[in-house]
Image (cartoon, rainbow, N blue to C red):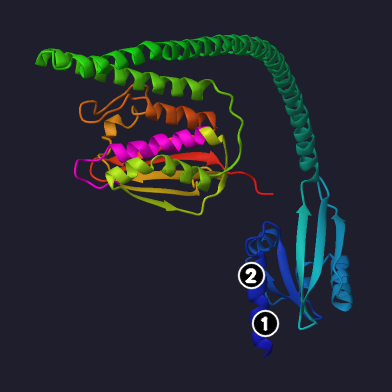
Amino acid sequence: MAEKQTNDWSSLCLAFTEHAPLPMATVEGATHIVRYANPAFCSLMSKPAEQLIGRPLSELLPEKDQCVSLLDRVFRTGKPESHTEQEQSKPHPIFWSYTMWPVLADERLVGVIIQVTETAKFHGKTVAMNEALMLGAVRQHELVEAGERLNARLEQEITERKQAEKELQKAKAALADEAVLLERLVAERTAELTSTNKQLEAFVYSIAHDLRAPLRAMQGFSETLVNDEGPALSEAGQDYVKRIRDSARYMDALLSDLLAFASITQQRIELAPTNLQPIVEAVLSRLEKDIAEKHALVETTGPWPVVMAHAPTLSQVLFNLLSNALKFVRPGVQPQIRVRAEEALVQPGFVRVWVEDNGIGIAPEHQEQIFRLFLRLHRDAYEGTGVGLAIVQKGVERMGGSLGVESSTERGSRFWFDLRKAEQH
């Protein structure tokens, strides 16, 4: 057991002290037997480890009684100690410094580690210290000069940065002035454009209204001519009169639609909570004759939420969409129309209304153009003036909504428009 403790003790000392730069040794027992000496201690004693280990420390340091007494006290008290003593020699004295601390195992003192420091060339080290101090002073002066240069550069950079910030502030102020000027110009141009548009809309409304009277006269006289003088007219004359009558009817329909477009553009709109269901029912009632003639199948799917809308404008929008769904169907195909509403997924707080049909559809390249005024994609096959969808777009926009279409020539069209949902109290 004692041998095992010694081995453990030696391993522990070796791990701590083998590469230590200071001389260190471990002693054991009342006679202070050296059990380990690191390479630095062997160098200090000028002896190999074999000549040191196993010998009492007092034999290695015969003239250092104070060191042995100090070691006895550490063994006795179990507390660390330190001591420095002077050994006279020529030409300069030698100083020995000892630091000792106990090592415990299982709460029992098993040895003491000794660290030895020897300052044999005290005078030389003093000179070296003075040289180091002088070099330090020179280095400090160099560092001061370098610091002053850095401070000067930093002050210059700060000055340049402040100047750049001033220039930036000036540029921002100038840009702000330009933005204010541009905003004022845009407001002025917008006001001018709005005024011009209103004047044009009023002019269109006036022209359309005034032209309807002579058109009705043309229609009336052409019909009278056919009824009263029809037999006397040649076949070519009868064809001319028919063309005049059909053109007058088309012109009257076009002017009627222009009046509707101008009206929906100019009229004062005040949005109010509006129930969709009675609006849909009223529009379908107006189209009841066309639905019956076409044998159309119309499906309405609730529930119908309350939206913020202008009831007459909303009725006009739905009327035009449903009229187109009844009209633009291939010959021999029963129109199938579905009207429904749902929460708008893209715009929270909005309601999306769908008008879906199985009609002829719209080619992808034309889907962005169909809401333009007077655009007619099928002018030879279907009657119309090209104003209906323009009215739909203008009406939805004036109610603060948006609209669009999903269509293909194989499956028909799905028109939709979004309106803000009315708040429930």
As for residue 294 lying within the magenta part, the answer is: no
Please tell me whether residue 156 is drawn above or below residue 407 in the rendered image. above
Q: Which mark is residue 398?
A: none
- Disc 1 on helix, strand or loop? helix
Q: Position of residue 423 (x, y in %)?
A: 64, 45
Q: Using the rendered view, name the quadrant where residue 79 is placed.
A: bottom right
Q: Earlier in the sequence, mark 1 or mark 2?
A: 1
- Relative horizontal placement of residue 63, taking residue 12 as reference (left or right): right
Q: Residues within 10 Å of mark 1 (few under 14, many from 20)?
A: some
As for residue 333 lying within the magenta part, the answer is: yes
- Disc 2 on helix, strand or loop? helix
Residue visible at 88% across and 71% down?
Answer: 69
Asked whether residue 204 appears in the rendered view, the answer is yes
Residue type, label 2:
Leu
Q: Which mark is residue 6?
A: 1
- Relative horizontal placement of residue 343, taking residue 183 as reference (left or right): left
Residue visible at 35% across and 29% down?
Answer: 368
Which is nearer the eye, 170 or 265? 265
Residue type, label 1:
Thr
- Relative horizontal placement of residue 286, taking residue 160 as reference (left or right): left
Label 1 and label 2: CA atoms lie apart by 12 Å
Asked whether residue 401 appears in the rendered view, the answer is no
Please tell me whether residue 57 is drawn above or below residue 343 in the rendered image. below
Q: In the rendered view of the protein, which quadrant contains the N terminus?
A: bottom right
Task: Count how many numbered circles sit on residues in the image.
Answer: 2
Q: Position of residue 349 (x, y in %)?
A: 57, 45
Give the labeled residue for mark 2: 14
- Per the rendered image, the range of residues in magenta is 313-335
- Relative horizontal placement of residue 233, taking residue 248 as reference (left or right): left
Q: Residues within 10 Å of mark 2 (few under 14, many from 20)?
A: some
